[in-house]
Amino acid sequence: MNHKEKLLEIYETSISCKSNFLFNRTKENLEFLKNIIESQKGVYTVLITLGIHKLLFPNQDIRYHQDNMEGGFSGRSIDTKFITPTLKNLKFPSMSESGWLTRSLEQPYPYNSLYNGKIGGNEKVKKVFLDLVHDIQHSDPRQLIQIIQNLLLFGIEIREKNKVDVVKIENSDLITINQVIQLLEVYFERNYKISGGSKLPVITFYSIYSILCEELKRFEGCKLGELGSHTSSDRTSKSSGDIEVFKKGKVVESLEIKYSIDIDKHIVNRVYEKIIRYNPKRYYILTTGNIKKEEYDEIMILVEEIRDIHGCQLIINGLLPTLKYYLRLIDDVSELVNRLSENIIGDKELKIIHKEVWSDLIQQLKRKSLYQL
């Protein structure tokens, strides 16, 4: 039996599992973890990987999570091959590839009290994680299965909460471009008090580009690239921008979308590096902020240099004005709203609150009561 099969076997038992006997400390730590899983997907994934591996290989000290450690094993490769793909299929919280891509978890030290990584950004998350690793290492098989069952039950609860219904806009005559812009402005600017809000404009432009690629002659024969993880750094993203348009396998247009960030020379120079590497014909930097006043002239000179030296047309513009222009180009603005609803509800990086707020806004849009927001 491999790790995927073992995980699915325990998942089947978790569905009908109502209560487990666990030590008080373990129960308290699991309860704490339950409330932070959506912002600590790496921690969640690593714990499941360690638990499954311990069941399959009882003699393995799972605290030694890298194969370059004496007596260690490669937790990351097991996670990448078996655990994360299975969590995705179950629609559970998961990372893009592996929990071990989280820098604080990939440090080359055993997961014990001396571990140096700043897990979760605070000492409480780190302590809970290391306590649970200790419990996984030292529990008997029955208790270990109960720990894993609890972790999977949390995933089931989050999956069910994420099933937010969004009403479809059926009559396109009842919605205007200005209403859509107002809707999105309210949606972007809401204070969610949780990470993920910066991806909302990216999903919006991804949705409208999916329509543009179908309707505009300029994009004839083009294909929209898959929407990647918005949490990936430039070092690991392996893409030219947040959104990419391909033609015959080559990037022809890219977008970099910034949320509440002013554009400076550093951002433009970093984009120039991507332009040189990927050779798009057009590159958009869109922001809800502005171009830094003190760097404006230098940035405009750099834009002209990129055009003259490389040939790429770099366009820096406001996010909402660009969106309003694109809305004038598509046949039916209600199609954007409906397609955006599908992408928001289906996105695994957005939190439940982002989906619930969108659902509420669509309800208000149908009642034409956005002025009340």
Image (spheres, helix red, strand yellow):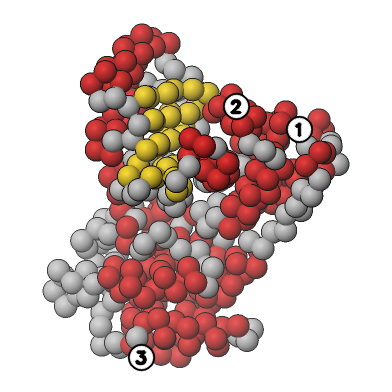
Decide which of 223, 257 is in the foreground and name it: 223
Q: Position of residue 70 (x, y in %)?
A: 13, 74
Query: Of discs 1 and 3, which sits in the foreground?
Result: 1
Q: Residues within 10 Å of mark 3 (few under 14, many from 20)?
A: few
How many angstroms separate mark 2 from mark 1 (CA)?
13 Å
Q: Is residue 102 left or right of residue 20?
A: left
- Residue drawn at the location 59% of the way across and 52% of the way down: 343
How many angstroms separate mark 1 from mark 3 (CA)?
56 Å
Decide which of 280, 109 is in the foreground and name it: 280
**Closer to the N terminus: mark 1 or mark 3?**
3
Q: Residues within 10 Å of mark 2 (few under 14, many from 20)?
A: few
Q: Quadrant of the N terminus?
A: bottom left
**Closer to the N terminus: mark 2 or mark 3?**
3
* Label drawn at residue 176: 1
Q: Position of residue 117 (x, y in %)?
A: 29, 55
Q: Secondary structure at mark 1?
A: loop
Residue type at mark 2 is Tyr
Residue type at mark 3 is Met
Q: Position of residue 182 (x, y in %)?
A: 71, 31
Decide which of 148, 282 is in the foreground and name it: 282
Q: Is residue 128 visible?
A: no
* Label drawn at residue 186: none
* Label drawn at residue 325: 2
Q: Is residue 300 left or right of residue 354?
A: left
- Residue drawn at the location 48% of the way across and 79% of the way down: 147
Query: Of discs 2 and 3, which sits in the foreground?
Result: 2
**Closer to the N terminus: mark 2 or mark 1?**
1
The answer to whether marks 2 and 3 mark residues whose Cβ atoms lie closer than 8 Å is: no
For mark 3, what is the residue?
Answer: 1
- Residue drawn at the location 32% of the way across and 62% of the way down: 100
Q: Residues within 10 Å of mark 1 (few under 14, many from 20)?
A: some
The answer to whether marks 2 and 1 mark residues whose Cβ atoms lie closer than 8 Å is: no
